[in-house]
Structure formats: structure tokens, C-alpha cells
Image (cartoon, helix red, strand yellow):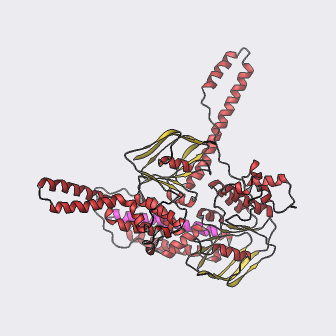
Amino acid sequence: MLLLSCNQLSRGFDAGPLFEELGFELYSGQRVGLVGPNGVGKTTLMRILAGLDRPDVGEVRLHAGARVSLLRQQPEFAPGQTLFDEARTALQELVAAHDDLVATADALAHATEESQKKALSARYDRLNEMLRFHDAYNVDHHVESVLHGLGFRDEDFQRSIDTFSGGQQSRLMLAKLLLAAPDVMLLDEPSNHLDIDATRWLEEYLAKQPEAMLIVSHDRYFLNKVVTKVFEMSSQSIQSYPGNFDAYWRLRRERYEQQMKAYESQREYIEKQEEYIRRVHYGQLHKQAASRQKQLDKIERVERPVWIDTPRMHFGQVRRAGDIILQADGLSKAYDRPLFSELTFTVRRGQRIGIMGPNGCGKTTLLKILLGQEKPDRGEVKHGHLIEFGYYDQQLRALDGSKSVIRAVWPNEDYDANEQAMRDLLGRFGLVGDQVYQAVDKLSGGERSRAALARLVAQGVNVLILDEPTNHLDLWACDALEQALADFDGTAIVVSHDRYFLNRVVDMLLVFEAPGRVSIIYGNYDMYERMRLVREGDAAPAELRTPERETPRVEAKPAKRKRRFPYRKVDDLEAEIAVQETLVKDLEARLASPDLYREGAKVQETAQAFEDAKTVLRELYEHWEEAVELNG
């Protein structure tokens, strides 16, 4: 059902238009990601859709009495309210309807006149049906479920909101929006302030909801899990792409290449016609020239397609270090509680190590210990030969805010490079023109991040230590950084909460899980997820679950479905499923073994065999279900 439509939306400020003549529709059940470079107007568009801002031109129409609500970034709560009571206000309409139902029931019990009883009975039935439809008899359970999912504990429920941090209050704002369940949810960076567990819960929750959603997010992994369509805002317009983030990222290039071919083909045709017209315009063929000119005038010109430029980041060649970059033996560290204990691992030249975990778990402390800036309580770190560390801290303190960009990035006064070389370097990181002479303090967060990365190149280091490098970077800069790290000749150790980034970059993960416990995963984030799901058991992927062996109850149906698979006995299929399940488990155990990763060629081969075995097992399950239903 159509819930919201926009027509000819335009909005601008003193610096010029943000967007012009935007038009799109949102239907129930659609989950749309809204992406675009920083500053194109995504937040402004969301505010217009929510009725908090007005377009210069155009209109937003809500259909069939649809409700729309925007996730606000600035929390506003009544003073002294508890967490649970404030969350429950999101369902105030249902709570009021329930109170009305109770009052109506009481009035019905005391009514004496038949007409009064009839009216009260009809009202009771309407209220009861509405409350059942919205599952309003389980309001408190629903509130508890959402609060738990977003990381709140039972002991938090009766605390005053004033005692919570800003990030926790933002999570409460998200909880209220989810509970209110407006017909159109406008979610601006909903995974901000969430740890990995809460983000996973939110992904699963949103994917099951029937409401329409427009979601602004820089979390590409989140977009992949949740959205079914992507709107790209750029060059004052909007383009629509079907599918999740990966589908959008692939299709945008294909669409650009097709549009560029059409543009170049038309331009070549027009240039040939114009050349012909110039040659014969004053000769005997001037009538033909005039005719061709009329044809040209009628042609609808194809505009040159716009491609969002990606910074061409590159870390350049660096000095070769020894085979072992560092060796951590039995590292332990605690403050008021244990951060990690007896942590042992080796970093070899060329590796990409990722470190992930919740805020405050000790990730940055571990980095400082590896760098030698802090001492462990126990254990030691040995550095290899010819290593040169370059540290990117997430507060970007390495950049002097009072200096111009070019001087802040310049390692020292006698650095052997001229100004043009430094401008070329900054240009590779998307800092061009007069930007290089601006004070660092005047830059946006994304520009400062790119300047700090450029400084690492200027230093010529061969071991990059990066603490949350994708913070402040847009999708295009993240993609460029990932490619630059893939091409880097040296070694990288990266702290990040960006699961998509970790998937593309790292080949080993240190995961801070329970307090004091760090798991070492030989692979990327997807490998960690597979191992986590298997370890948790009840959350194992469907393709790894064993089908129930009970005799199924086959109910009579008007007509049997057609067979997809050839006839086979159920017992034979169950025997084959058992064999295939064993194979899948063996391959998964092999992938979890560190020994496998000493043989580079075997890793891809084993991973492919694992995926193929899961595909065969999934088809066997489907064949088994069909046989149970149709073999009768």
C-alpha cells in the first residue's frame, strides 16, 4: 500500500540548492536505504518528510492517514521519568484504549437499560478487537523485549533517565520509535550508540516489521542486512536501485557505464551531423543540411552521467620489515576490572589484524601496549626488525589544529619534498585546491580523517596502527581506504566497529567478548559470525540445523503441489542428509583451525568446498520436505 509520496521537492540555502525536483514513493513493507556523500541534504530531506522543515518547492503527501516519525538525534524527556515509564509512553494510545476497555467493561456490568447495554457492548467489542490486533494485552512484555534488545538491563528499568549517558538516551529514543511503530519510520543513523549485539538485534527486528522505512546509515553491513532498496542522493537529484547495499554498489557502476556509453554514442552522432552540416550548409546540399539540423534540434539530449568521485588513496611503497612484526606473549591488563588476560598472538609482515569489541573493553589500551606507550600488568611485546609504526588515533590528536593542512601533514621542516609533491599527496586523499591551506580546525570530520591518513603516507611508515579509521568517512572514502589497505606493502593493525570494513580488510581478528576474554579468529568478520552462531547453537544458521526426524503430520490439502525434485524415498534422503551434515561440520572445523591458514592455497579451496556443501545440504532439506509431503 502506498504510504508516502514526494513530488518536485526542492530545498536550498544561501550556498545554493541542496536538491531539486526530487520525487519518490514509499510503500508498506519497503525498507529503503538513503545514501550519498556528506552534505548532499539527506538529513534535510528526512526533516521535510517528517514535517519538521518545509521544501522551497514541491509537496509531501501522506496517504490513507499514515503516520510518519523521525528518529531524533537530540533526546528530550520529562524530568524524573524512569526508563521503563518513558519507553511505555510510546504506546500511550494503546494504554489509553486498554483503560477505556476496562472502564467500558465496568459500565457494562452496571448498566440497566437495554439500549445502554447494547451501545456499551458494541464499544467493548471494537476496543477489544483493536487491542487484539495490536497485541496490546502484552504491552509491558513488548516494552521489556525492545529495551533488552537495545542493551538495557532489568536493573535499568526503574532508574531515572537523568542518570543515563547521552548514548543511552539516544538508544531510548530509538526504543520509543520502534514501540510506536509509525507507518513510515525515518531512521537517521539508527545503529549509532549500539554495540554489536544490539545492532544484530536491531537488524533482525527491522527486517521483520511491516512498516515502511527510510534509513540513513554509514553502516554498510547494517544496510546489507536490512534494506530492500537504495536511494542515492547526489548532484541535487536522487536515483533508485533495487536490492541491498552490495547490489546497489554493483548496479551503480553498471548503470553509469551504460549511461556513459549512451551519452558518448549520442555525442559522436551529433558531432558527425554537425560536421556534415558545417561542410555543406552553403553548398548545393544546403537543403539536406537544414533538414538534418531540424532533426538534431528535435533530439532529446542525453546528459552526461554523474559519477561520485572516490579519493584515490594509496599508501605508497615502504621499507621492507622483518618476517615477524611483533610477538605478544601472555599479555594481561586490568584497571577496575580485567580487560584481557594471558593474550598471546603473533603479527607477521603483510598481515591485516582487526580488533573489535564493545566500548571500554580495552581495545585502545591494547594498541598502546603494542606501541610501547603503556605497560601491561603481565607479559611482554617484542618488536621485529626495521619496523616503523604510524599511529592514527580516533581523536586525530596527531594533527596540529592551528596549522594549515599542508603544514600539519608535512612531517618536519626539512622533509625532502616540495610543495607540489605534498599537494599531490593530499589530492590522493581528496584534499584539493584551497583546502590544503585551510587551518586543520576548519575542516570537517571526514576531511580531518583523510588528512591524518595522508600524514601516515608522508611519514613513510611500514606498520599502520589505525584506531577507528572509518569514523567520519563517507561510503566512498571507506571504499577507497579499504582498497588502499589491500594494496599496502606493509602491515596493518586496525581497531574498528565497522563490520563491512573488517570483512574486506582483515585476515585475523582479536574479538573482545566477555570481560577479560579475547578470542582469536583466523579470518574476517564473516568467519567470526559463522563460528559464533555454531558456538551458540540455538542461533545456528538454518542450513546447518538438522531437520526434525519425527513423522510429520501431513494435513489434507485441496491440491498437492508439483514436484521440483525426482521421486526418492524419505529414508534414503535422511541417510544422505546425515552424511552431508557430517561433511559440513568437518569442513567448518577445518576452517576454524589455525593450521589451515599456513597454507594460503588451501584456504580458498576449503571455503569454497564449505559453501558448496551447504548448498547441497540446503537442497537435500528441500527435497526431504517435498518427499514427506508428496510421497504419501
Which residue occupies the extreme left position in the image? 113
317 vs 257, nearest the viewer: 317
Image label count: 0
Q: Residue at x 82, y 67 (%)?
A: 319
Which residue occupies the extreme front position in the image? 79
Q: Quadrant of the C terminus?
A: bottom left
Image: 167 above or below 55 = below
The quarter of the picture where residue 93 lies is bottom left
Relative to residue 122, is residue 499 drawn left or right?
right
510 vs 568, nearest the viewer: 510
- Tell me if residue 620 is in the magenta stretch: yes
Relative to residue 417, is residue 200 drawn left or right?
left
Which residue occupies the extreme bottom position in the image? 378
Question: Could one spot residue 328 in this view of the protein?
Answer: yes
**Percent x, y of residue 421:** 83, 54
**Percent x, y of residue 216:** 54, 54
Question: Could one spot residue 623 in this view of the protein?
Answer: no
Image: 418 above or below 60 = below
Relative to residue 472, is residue 166 drawn left or right?
left
- Tell me if residue 472 is in the magenta stretch: no
**Percent x, y of residue 364:** 66, 72
**Percent x, y of residue 397:** 71, 65
Secondary structure of the magenta portion, mostly? Answer: helix
621 vs 77, nearest the viewer: 77
In the image, the segment drawn in magenta is 603-632
Q: Residue at x 80, y 75 (%)?
A: 385
Image: 50 above or below 161 = above
The quarter of the picture where residue 222 lies is bottom right
